[in-house]
Amino acid sequence: MEVLVELQQVSKSYEEKVAVHDLSLKIEAGSMFGLLGPNGAGKTSTIRMMIGITRPDSGAVTLFGKPFSAAALQRVGYLPEERGLYRKMKVIEQLVFLAELRGLGAAEATRRAKEWCEKLQIADVMNKKTEELSKGMQQKIQFISTLLHDPELIIMDEPFSGLDPVNAVLLQDTLLELKKQGNAVLFSTHRMDQVEKLCDSICLINKGAAVLSGGMREIKSRYERNHLVVQYEGSDGFLGHPAIESYKTYADRVEIRLKPHANAQDLLRTAAATSTITKFELAEPSLEEIFIETVGGRADA
């Protein structure tokens, strides 16, 4: 697969604060990449170096197989965390204007803008002013503006912010379609469940440095399958079993973390002796659990 963006040992400091330290990663065409980390970890600083808003103090940024150049940005779509729309402009006028800034002619920009509005189910507000729309609607407009020039590399900083579950799924499906077409998608988010469902690879950074990176399947394979989801009726006495390290009780289930190398079948036998077990599932840890375990108390306040 073609590598669309690569960072090679990049570092960036602002006065006394190290924002990014010796960070390397690469993103291939037709893949989805998650850039993760707690607040202040260096995610946005990393993205800004990718697209030339800032330059690294050391290391190299490569776009489409060549050293970074402003001309290469015509092949990149960027959705920043800080949104920026013209509140008094009508939606269609705004999208056409932003597409023209990317080099599209007025007729083609209008055609694409209308097509995307239909696709993302906002065609009925094309002639409304931005200030009349909800935060979620404005987010979809910003999302569309990132894609109008058909970029090969799509970089999105918190793309699902402000969206209800229905619209979040709509944007997720759109990103998956773009991935199938060969585009590369990088997004930064705090939503571990979305990263787990969507991303092929991740890089988790903390205090500017990579602490966990690689393919999603490979990363998860490093962790023991010691998480249980149990649904039951009857006594909860089995929760005192010595194999259990910790557990959390929810409305319809209990989630159990086993001690290292504990015997799950022995726990099942104990539970079945006093309760009716309707679900007993041994699972790998979620990405959220891996995130918390990896970062732990090391994140900045």
Image (cartoon, rainbow, N blue to C red):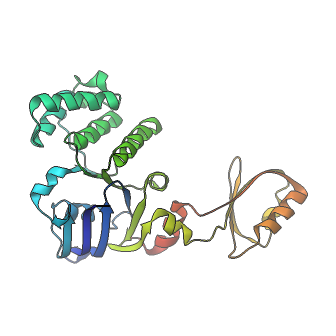
Image quadrant in which the C terminus is located: bottom left
> Between residues 229 and 62, which one lies in front from this camera angle?
62
> Between residues 39 and 148, which one lies in front from this camera angle?
148
Q: Residue furthest right?
A: 273
Q: Is 203 left, or right, of 13 in this rendering?
A: right
Q: How many marks?
A: 0
Image quadrant in which the N terminus is located: bottom left
Q: Is 159 left, or right, of 89 in this rendering?
A: right
Residue at 19 percent of width and 59 percent of height:
51
Image coordinates of residue 34 in percent, x first then y, are 38, 59
From where the camera sits, is residue 256 visible?
yes
From where the camera sits, is residue 90 visible?
no
Residue at 31 percent of width and 66 percent of height:
26
* Quadrant in which residue 47 is drawn: bottom left
* Quadrant in which residue 131 is drawn: top left
Image coordinates of residue 179 in percent, x first then y, are 36, 49
Residue at 81 percent of width and 62 percent of height:
268
Q: Residue furthest front?
A: 1
Image coordinates of residue 276 in percent, x first then y, are 85, 51
Image coordinates of residue 81 in percent, x first then y, are 28, 51
Q: Is 220 left, or right, of 158 in this rendering?
A: right
